[in-house]
Amino acid sequence: MDTSPADLGERQLKWEAAIAAARLVFGLLLLASIATLVAWAFRAQLEAFGHAFVDRFGALGLVIGTALADGLHVPIPPQFYLLTGIAAGFSHALTFGAVLVGSEIGCFLAFRIGHVAVRLRWVERRIRVPRAMLERFLTTQGHLGLAIATLLPISYCLLCITAGAMRLSNRAWLVLAAMRIPKLLVSYAVLVYAWRF
């Protein structure tokens, strides 16, 4: 029985989506394990750092740090700021809200950077693989494909830059921004559990 290229492409996308889901679960388990170990081994130091950070910079520090992480790919991930707020005993709503706002600002910044920076050769080389993947997902699944792509082990910043470089609509940016909410919520829940455990 012959299979058409469209059938092969759809199977590949389903396979990539299944792998993405497995990697997401593995990543969350890894995050929980590392956070639990760090909280157990360095609890006093984390509490002292969390209090110092929050006392000095407050919620605005969480927003700015996360915006830099998700907008400019600064190597300190948003989970660091979530854990900082948790360790400081900062309000759960305020910690999560500040990190979410920072992440959405970062997403918007990266999306707009993609619009401008696509003309730079090194950016074009850097987004070649995510761009090919996004094009496949968008061709077969539309904006649902973009939502699925947020589950893949690709930096959120790079995904936003790639979407911007592809000149996707503002609706695409909204999909990326909306998909950030459940991912951060799950990360936050895992970190709270690990800290309490």
Image: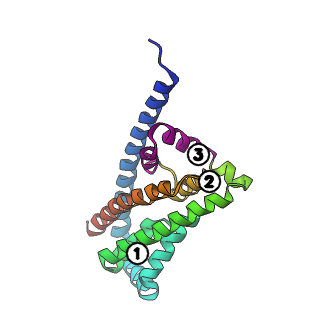
**Count of all numbered marks drawn on residues in the image:** 3
Q: Amino acid at mark 1?
A: Ala
Are dots 2 and 1 in contact, CB under 8 Å?
Answer: no
Residue at disc 2, secondary structure: helix
**Sequence-first disc among 3 and 2:** 3
Mark 3 or 2, closer to the camera: 2
> Where 153 falls versus 82 (above or below)?
above
What residue is pinned by disc 3? 131
Are dots 3 and 2 in contact, CB under 8 Å?
Answer: yes
What residue is pinned by disc 2? 165
- x 71%, y 54%: residue: 122
**Sequence-first disc among 2 and 1:** 1
Q: Amino acid at mark 2?
A: Ala
Residue 178 painted magenta: no
User: Dot 1, how many residues are within 10 Å of its Cα: few (below 14), some (14-19), or many (20+)?
Assistant: many
Residue 190, position as x, y percentages in the image = 31, 61
